[in-house]
Image (cartoon, coloured by chain):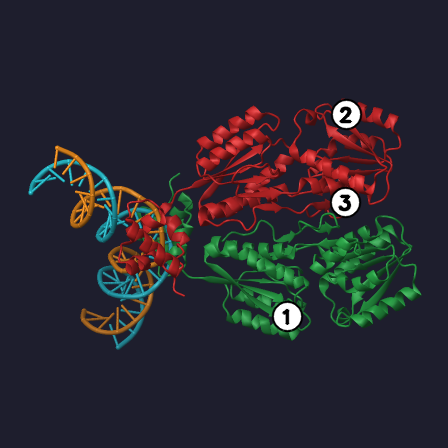
Chain colours: A red, B green, C cyan, D orange
Amino acid sequence: MEKITINDIARLTGLSKGTVDRVLHNRGEVSPKSYQKVMDVIRELGYEPNLYASLLARAEQRTIALLLPTHEPGTYWELAAKGETKAQAGLKPLSMVTRQFNYNQYSADSFREACARVLESHPAGVVMAPMFQYETQVFARELQAQGIPYTLVDTKLETPGYLSFYGIPAYKSGYLCAAMLTSGEPVKEVLIVRIMRDKGRQSDPTVMRRSGFMDYMLEHNPGCTIRSLFINPEDPAATDDALDAFFKEFPGVRHIAMLNSRIHLIVPFLERHPADRRVMGFDNLSANVDALKRGTVSALIAQRPEEQVHKAIQALADRIVFQRLPEKTDNYQHMDILIRYNADDY
Amino acid sequence: MEKITINDIARLTGLSKGTVDRVLHNRGEVSPKSYQKVMDVIRELGYEPNLYASLLARAEQRTIALLLPTHEPGTYWELAAKGETKAQAGLKPLSMVTRQFNYNQYSADSFREACARVLESHPAGVVMAPMFQYETQVFARELQAQGIPYTLVDTKLETPGYLSFYGIPAYKSGYLCAAMLTSGEPVKEVLIVRIMRDKGRQSDPTVMRRSGFMDYMLEHNPGCTIRSLFINPEDPAATDDALDAFFKEFPGVRHIAMLNSRIHLIVPFLERHPADRRVMGFDNLSANVDALKRGTVSALIAQRPEEQVHKAIQALADRIVFQRLPEKTDNYQHMDILIRYNADDY
DNA sequence: AAAATTTCCGTGTACGGTAACGGAAATTCA
DNA sequence: TGAATTTCCGTTACCGTACACGGAAATTTT
């Protein structure tokens, strides 16, 4: 029941605590025989180092790097970035800090450049929201080579040796979206509004979501026509025109979804042309939630991005400080359904 | 930028670190003059004690007591109790442990007795799910007198000096339940199934939920008849009979809700008498979720009880170890909507 | 075989606080 | 005024780990 210390181990092995310490940290200068002896005793007694003593003696600050897309106000990544703040409280007592590195989510170059800056900063760990399959792999390999643990949030790209992933299952979220859009009843036409830029380099989650969406419709609403419309997020007037043209051509469409966080972009149009519609979107951006409360948007599928980031940071810190591995590698998070009556305390 | 230590303070005040320590901990034996001098320097330099050094020197284990209703398998409180496990990982490095004290949620005596045992154990803090207004107040006052901080989960009773509360807003959850039950459309009759025992001593959240439920109906469905049926949770056969009799008398009822976690109790009956119904319940007990996946239950309103307990413990630990107050006192948690398509990763 | 290295290990101190102990100074008592 | 207390404060020994330093023993070199 007594706490085992390195002094105990030193005594029992007939060696000094300096040697024990060398064994514990693999800093060499120990004969194989002594090494073995120490290891045996450690295992036998179930020695656990005293965290406080260790941190006190080291007294150095380690930093966790966050690699996230730049977060303009009112965007999804602004929410995610809040997770940093939440995590800081827990990190401080471990004398760890976070540092954020941002990149343009539409530019692979900018991502690469951000990766370089991360490496320069010699972080003790990295949390990243990856966007580019190839570049991320390269970066991941480098991290692995340097023995820097990392966790993924939001998008799960297949990279070697990640510690854990936090995010919602993309395919399932599309499936859920379709189920909620149609309420399980037969529908003749639905509209999926998409972002123009997405055409060039599609983000992985959006593609997967669409696939889940399509599958649900195929299974439950095979007769339904699924129409697409592309809008330019930078140009509200053009968006308006596009929607106008669309509804002139297909006035019967009453079910609308966007599979990204930007449903708020079409809200102004919808509110200028009231009708009995069902509208689905993703993520609790304040513009989206406002539209939800006004009834323009029927429901949102949300995912607590700040919590994902928080958990990813925490998992990393646990690993770094306590050498503790997370229970699961892939931590799929719950898909929250937001309607006007439960959006308040979110 | 340099870290200030008590040695610095000792040097600057011309006193010894023993004296400084006495000032820091208010353990007396310090002249007013010295006391003032030390305080001035501390304030001026913004001294912050080094947590590790402090904890290392003390090296004592503190315990947080959990005061929860007994948790039979398959009940709500079993879920809540899981929060203890989750919290333990974070507590260990702070050399804190938890210890659970249970009481019969239907017996005030048992609650009082559990309170006594909690006090005997001299905890550093208490997390409790209170049930009895008066007894809880008495207990809270005692805790306050002894300077033991405490947090509330699940039910927010008005008690003096609680550190924080974690739970969902009861009234709103009833309101939400009604909204989801009726899908916003006019309904002629709804059935609320209640637990017999509830009649004697009603639990606060259930009463509040019912009130929210009623208000929604009044506002959105004034013409609707709301019927009640009491069932005995201990007697499935009687439950069956009661339901049978009810539906013989009111065959038109297609909307059913229970405002507690026991919706699973009526699931067997519903499945033996299939019909096109809308059924709402609360909480993600596995029996409930199974029924949800089979389509018998339309939706559940869930509240992550283990997370509530976890957060409550964490808040307490933060307070005890780091003297840090939680940002908010009342932390209303999100009401999760569970349908068959998003119940998997919950 | 002596000198030069290398390998391996013990000693000692720092990290920042805690708290017991004991003694000098101030105060009260006789 | 001297003795007995109190008040107030400094000293010191930890708490358990990290790591620099230096030296003895083992090994290699000349």
Q: Residue at x 63, y 55 (%)?
A: B166
Q: Residue at x 57, y 59 (%)?
A: B84
Residue B119 visible in the snapshot = yes
Of the two numbered discs 2 and 3 in the rendering, the one whose residue sits closer to the viewer: 2
Can you say whether B40 is above or below B250 in the image?
above
Q: Residue at x 53, y 70 (%)?
A: B119
Residue for badge 1: B135
Q: Secondary structure at mark 3?
A: loop
The amino acid sitting under disc 2 is Thr
Residue A239: mark: 2
- Give the chain of mark 3: A
- The quarter of the picture where residue A14 lies is bottom left
The amino acid sitting under disc 1 is Glu
* C-alpha gap between disc 2 and disc 1: 61 Å
In this view of the protein, which residue sits in the foreground, D30 or A173?
Answer: D30
* C-alpha gap between disc 1 and disc 3: 37 Å
> Do the residues under discs 2 and 1 have CB atoms within 8 angstroms?
no
Q: Earlier in the sequence, mark 2 or mark 3?
A: 2
Residue for badge 3: A340
Q: Secondary structure at mark 2?
A: helix
User: Dot 2, crowdedness within 10 Å: few (<14), some or many (≥20)?
Assistant: many
